[in-house]
């Protein structure tokens, strides 16, 4: 079954579950526009998640999902809330949902893990995942090592459930490219940072608008938790500490509360401005709806152009 039918959405686009950002206003706007809005539960208490779910339902009557960041210690409580509030789609990240799969299935909850490799994609299919988001290292936040271009076709070949492409996609060309690689849909995070409904401090949006293709880098490799964000004073200090083989405590001290600093306080030099490599392409503030409809129109133009490109005519085949 197609991903749009399976989930009851119009466009095969998921909004990335950006921690502290993907809350009711953005999620409701994306779902109202026909995409899949996804609440980021990472960092929320059970009651805060319940509130975001209820607020989202005040904004939209369309399907939306909850993302479970599996490194969070309160995952069991968050899952109880998902069940109690009758949310029917979850995406998972940064770990394995194995211990909870039976619970999800018993409650007819669709499970869509985000994965950084073929090996983990296959494992998720075996566990009973309903679809997979294959996320390349171009993405913002916690990332794997393989690029979307290389990861996507390999995951598509390795599993028989629908695959959604993520990482480095922010316009119609990227969507068309994901389709060309075998994806049934896309997940987009960074581009949603420059929407009107995105609730970050204006400085955070401006940092994304000002970014170019080389503005992001990865920190935290030495701790086994690589994170992509826009380079700034804090990131420079972090990388210097990592080069000096600083202890986990020292590194964690520097990054403590850093996402909040950037997202809420607008401190984009000392805070963590998580964003993907495609930030350089995100330089216009629009509504989520305009962004989604424009991107699919662009994707159609790209596909039309590709269809009229004849390799026979060029005598390449
Ligand atoms: O999770 C993400 N991206 C994130 S989470 C996040 S919150 C955070 N805040 C501060 C520091 C670190 C993180 C920000 N961005 N993307 C999905 C993703 N999942 N990427 C990689 C994975 C992943 C990794 C290992 C999924 C599964 C996995 O292992 C599963 C297994 O079975 O071993």
Image: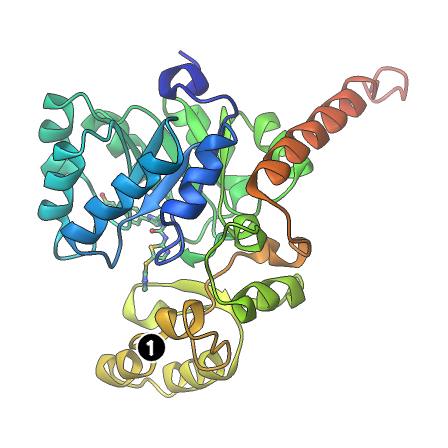
Residue 269 percent location from the top left of the image: 50, 81
Q: Which residue is pictured at 44% across the width and 82% down the height?
A: 270
**Which residue, given by chain and number where applicable, does mark 1 sit on?**
255
- Residue toward you, 190 or 183: 190
Q: Position of residue 35 (x, y in %)?
A: 48, 31
Percent coordinates x, y for residue 295 in the rendering: 65, 35
Residue 161 on image: x %, y %: 36, 21
Residue 51 located left or right of residue 79 = right
Asked whether residue 161 is in view, the answer is: no
**Quadrant of the image occupied by residue 246:** bottom left
Residue at position x 13%, y 23% from top?
A: 107
Task: State the image quarter where residue 106 is shown.
Answer: top left
The quarter in which the N terminus is drawn is top left
Element at label 1: helix
Crowd class of label 1 (few under 14; some 14 to 19; many from 20; radius 10 Å): some
Residue lying at 17% horizontally and 56% vertically, measured from the top left: 45
Most extreme residue toward the front, as rendered?
A: 58
Mark 1 C-beta closer than 8 Å to ligand 1: yes
Residue 240 is at least partly visible in this image: yes
């Amino acid at each position: 079954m197609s991903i749009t039918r399976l989930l009851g959405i119009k466009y095969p686009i998921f909004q990335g579950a950006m921690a502290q950002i993907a809350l009711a206003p953005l999620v409701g706007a994306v779902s109202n526009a026909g995409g899949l809005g996804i609440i980021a539960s990472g960092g929320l208490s059970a009651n805060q998640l319940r509130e975001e779910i209820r607020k989202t339902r005040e904004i939209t009557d369309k399907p939306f999902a909850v993302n479970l960041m599996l490194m969070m210690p309160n995952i069991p409580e968050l899952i109880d809330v998902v069940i109690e509030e009758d949310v029917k789609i979850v995406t998972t990240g940064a770990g394995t949902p194995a211990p909870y799969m039976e619970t999800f299935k018993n409650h007819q909850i669709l499970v869509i893990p985000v994965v950084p490799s073929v090996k983990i994609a296959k494992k998720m299919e075996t566990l009973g995942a309903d679809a997979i988001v294959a996320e390349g290292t171009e993405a913002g936040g916690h990332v794997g090592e393989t690029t979307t271009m290389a990861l996507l076709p390999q995951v598509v070949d390795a599993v028989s459930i629908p695959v959604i492409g993520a990482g480095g996609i922010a316009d119609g060309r990227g969507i068309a490219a994901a389709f060309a690689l075998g994806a049934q849909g896309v997940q987009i995070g960074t581009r949603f940072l420059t929407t009107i409904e995105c609730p970050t401090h204006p400085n955070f949006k401006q940092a994304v608008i000002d970014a170019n293709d080389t503005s992001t880098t990865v920190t935290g490799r030495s701790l086994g938790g690589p994170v992509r964000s826009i380079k700034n004073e804090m990131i420079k200090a972090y990388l210097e500490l990592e080069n000096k083989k600083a202890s986990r405590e020292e590194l964690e001290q520097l990054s403590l509360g850093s996402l909040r600093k950037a997202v809420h306080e607008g401190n984009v030099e000392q805070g963590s401005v998580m964003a993907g490599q495609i930030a350089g392409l995100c330089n216009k503030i629009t509504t989520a709806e305009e962004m989604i409809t424009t991107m699919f129109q662009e994707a159609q133009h790209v596909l039309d152009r590709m269809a009229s490109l004849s390799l026979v005519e060029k005598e390449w085949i």
